[in-house]
Image (cartoon, rainbow, N blue to C red):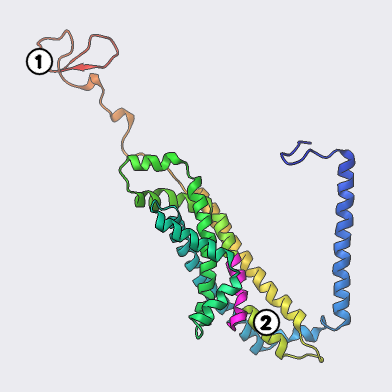
Amino acid sequence: MSASVLYDAPGPKAVVRNRIYAVVGSLAIVALIAVSIMRLADKGHLAPEMWDIFNYAGIRQNIADAVLATLKAFGLAAVGSLVLGVLLAVGRLSDHKPIRWVATTFIELFRSLPLLITIYAIWVGFLTDYSMWALAAGLSVYNGCVQAEVLRAGINSVPKGQSEAAYALGMSKTQVMTTVLMPQAIRSMLPTIISQLVVTLKDTSLGFIILYPELLQTARLIASNTQVNGQYPYVSTIVVIGTIYIAMCLLLSALATWIEKRGRRAKTGIKVAPGVQTADIPTVEDIPGPREGGAGGAGPTVDGAAGTGVRKD
């Protein structure tokens, strides 16, 4: 058994002990889940009538509208956070101190503020009548700061020799950033970028605080306004809405995995121009004209050293 960098490889007794702990822990978790299900069933939360409410056309339409509203806010926030992240990352890496200070202050300020406060402040102060834009703006500001730090780390991870080679070719700093550094940074940090987008998708649930009709707000309205057998179907509503959230996050993660694999399969490098073969390149012997020892002194000659291929004019 090979040892790890973080800890030594467990011995035979430790392996047996770890297996026992794993079995006991798994049984405890299963028992806890079983007790929870039994208690919910005793209180009537798992009755078929609690789940039958999702067969109503009105509730289904409300959930569909909530999913669409959630995706709208997420789409705006995703685009806004990525654009803002690029601008802040470039600003923080700028050679001009005022720009670098402004970008750093902006990032540190909004990363320190709770996202809920940011969303609520934008809604109350600027976009009271536009809850979707307030939610998207709050998500864009907070997640844009996080994406900026991710991109900055990716840019700093690119070997310095590549930017130095680009400068040696006469490229400006803008060209180096847009054509050399930024593409490599995005490609290397793509899993982290997508992970933050998943967080952005889940954070759309904070829209309930500004009464935006996203999934969580719709779930609260359905559960509090629908009564079955004298009870409110909070458990069934939470399970259904939570499943929808999980499905959307898994789809986004699958998209990220597909993009990453496609990027790895992408062909890179410089292609050789078609039709150019080694045999087509002329050699010294193919050049017409008198050689050393030939008649006449006109024209190019070859040095007397055999095999040097140095021509004299």
Question: Can you give x and y, in whole percent of width and height, for residue 107 in the image?
Answer: 51, 61
Mark 2 Cα shell of 10 Å, populated few (<14), some (14-19), many (≥20): many
- Per the rendering, the mark at residue 219 is 2
Q: Is residue 296 magenta?
A: no
Q: Helix or strand or loop: what does disc 1 sit on?
A: loop
Residue type at mark 2: give it: Ala
Dot 2 or dot 1: first in sequence order is 2
Residue type at mark 1: give it: Ala
* Left or right for 58, reference 118: right
Q: Is residue 274 above or below residue 124?
A: above
Q: Quadrant of the C terminus?
A: top left
Q: Helix or strand or loop: what does disc 2 sit on?
A: helix
Question: Can you give x and y, in whole percent of width and height, for residue 171 in the image?
Answer: 32, 46
- Per the rendering, the mark at residue 298 is 1
Question: Can you give x and y, in whole percent of width and height, for residue 296 in the image?
Answer: 9, 11
Query: Can residue 299 be seen in this snapshot?
Result: yes
Q: Tell me the magenta residue range.
A: 199-213
Q: Is residue 170 above or below residue 151?
A: above
Which residue is more in the foreground, 96 or 195? 96
Query: Can residue 187 be seen in this snapshot?
Result: no
Q: Is residue 206 magenta?
A: yes
Q: Residue at x 20, y 22 (%)?
A: 287
Q: Residue at x 79, y 38 (%)?
A: 9
Q: How many marks?
A: 2
Which residue is more in the foreground, 262 or 15? 15
* Left or right for 131, reference 24: left
* Left or right for 88, reference 240: left
Q: Quadrant of the N terminus?
A: top right
